[in-house]
Image (cartoon, rainbow, N blue to C red):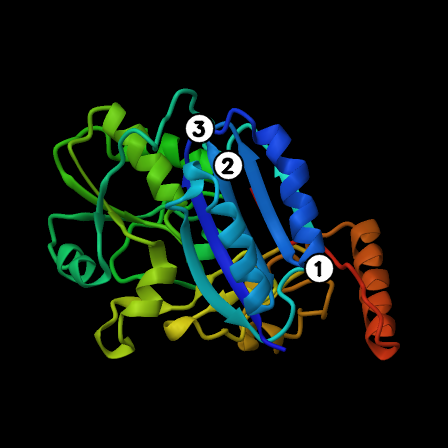
């Protein structure tokens, strides 16, 4: 079976988000969906997967709530189950930036389509800002994009303050995986006095879906937060796997390295793992192989990072 994967979010006031959590979890469990959904007072954010019919059912149900009628959803496919379980969590923020009072529901940067994006980033006076983290940018980005070298989204504000705040009139074109980080960062930057903020509508996922590869300005693959690890043009699955030791995506070349140990470590982390962690990962890998041999499920390691 092929799984339908849905990445979605909306910034909207949800005063009853704690109450919503229980009913949403029950619906997802009934439909046997897998993935992660985050709920907060500022809105909803998630990526879930299941059969096409069941994914359609959950969004038909969600959109019965007038507040979620225009929910942003991007679809793709996975050959195998991209998550182990369903998780619905309450959070302070649906995307953690750590700045109080930011309200993307009120005002964000100007949304730019895939076609308009190519023209925008071709302007040498435009700062093209990749708002993702270094483990994501490592496997793909737009040509000439600025990589802030962050390890978590909460660090992007400090980067902006140090490197961009001296020229708030300059055009800044930002992008992220699905659009949610740009919504929040652009809202903050506009409040701070930046004047010309643009964001890729629907993020990289929408761009890779709509833009023909021969016209694309994207280089490499796009990191995704599920067991596919990466996707490329037309949202086809890439060949990256996840290092369980450090959480970084690995290419086929990385996996051929003498320092790579399947399920344990890669060249990036082989010298930094403690003996205890290394032994634990080896035992985990052993159990995964046994489970696969016996056709049983093994929950494995969480691959999400804040």
The C terminus - image quarter: top right
Name which residue lies at 65% across and 52% down: 28
Residue at the spot of label 2: 94
Q: Quadrant of the N terminus?
A: bottom right
Q: Nearer the viewer, mark 3 or mark 1?
A: 3
Residue identified by numbered label 3: 13
Q: Position of residue 197 (x, y in %)?
A: 20, 39
- Which mark is first along the chain, 1 or 2? 1
**Is residue 74 something that shows in the picture?**
yes
Q: Is residue 248 left or right of residue 179?
A: right
Q: Residues within 10 Å of mark 3 (few under 14, many from 20)?
A: some
Q: Nearer the viewer, mark 3 or mark 2?
A: 3
Who's the residue at 50% across and 53% down the image?
59
Q: Position of residue 271 (x, y in %)?
A: 68, 56
Query: According to the image, label 1 marks what residue?
Result: 84
Whether tag 2 and tag 1 are in contact, CB under 8 A, the answer is no
Q: Quadrant of residue 12?
A: top left
Circle 1 crowding by C-alpha within 10 Å: few under 14, some 14–19, many from 20: some
Task: Give the image location of residue 47, x and y in percent.
Answer: 54, 53
Do labels 3 and 2 touch, CB within 8 Å? Answer: no
249 left or right of 81?
Answer: left
């Amino acid at each position: 079976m092929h799984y339908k994967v849905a990445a979605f979010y909306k910034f909207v006031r949800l005063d009853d988000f704690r109450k919503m959590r229980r009913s949403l979890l029950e619906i997802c469990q009934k439909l046997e969906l897998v993935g992660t959904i985050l709920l907060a007072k500022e809105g909803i954010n998630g990526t879930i997967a299941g059969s096409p019919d069941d994914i359609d059912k959950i969004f038909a149900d969600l959109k019965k709530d007038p507040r979620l009628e225009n929910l942003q959803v991007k679809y793709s496919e996975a050959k195998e189950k991209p998550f182990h379980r369903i998780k619905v969590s309450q959070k302070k923020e649906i995307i953690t930036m750590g700045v109080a009072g930011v309200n993307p529901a009120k005002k964000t940067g100007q949304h730019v389509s895939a076609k308009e994006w190519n023209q925008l980033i071709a302007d040498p006076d435009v700062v093209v800002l990749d708002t993702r983290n270094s483990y994501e940018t490592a496997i793909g980005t737009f040509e000439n994009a600025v990589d802030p070298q962050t390890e978590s989204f909460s660090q992007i504000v400090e980067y902006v303050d140090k490197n961009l705040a001296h020229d708030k009139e300059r055009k800044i074109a930002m992008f992220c995986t699905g659009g949610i980080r740009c919504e929040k960062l652009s809202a903050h930057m506009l409040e701070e006095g930046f004047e010309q903020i643009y964001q890729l509508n629907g993020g990289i996922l929408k761009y890779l879906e709509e833009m023909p590869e021969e016209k694309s300005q994207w280089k490499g693959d796009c990191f995704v937060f599920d067991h596919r690890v990466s996707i490329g043009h037309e949202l086809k699955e890439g060949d990256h796997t996840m290092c369980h030791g450090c959480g970084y995506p690995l290419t086929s070349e990385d996996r051929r390295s003498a320092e790579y140990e399947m399920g344990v470590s890669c060249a990036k982390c082989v010298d930094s793992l403690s003996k205890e962690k290394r032994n634990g990962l080896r035992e985990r890998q052993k159990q995964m192989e046994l489970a696969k041999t016996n056709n049983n499920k093994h929950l494995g390691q969480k691959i999400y990072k804040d």
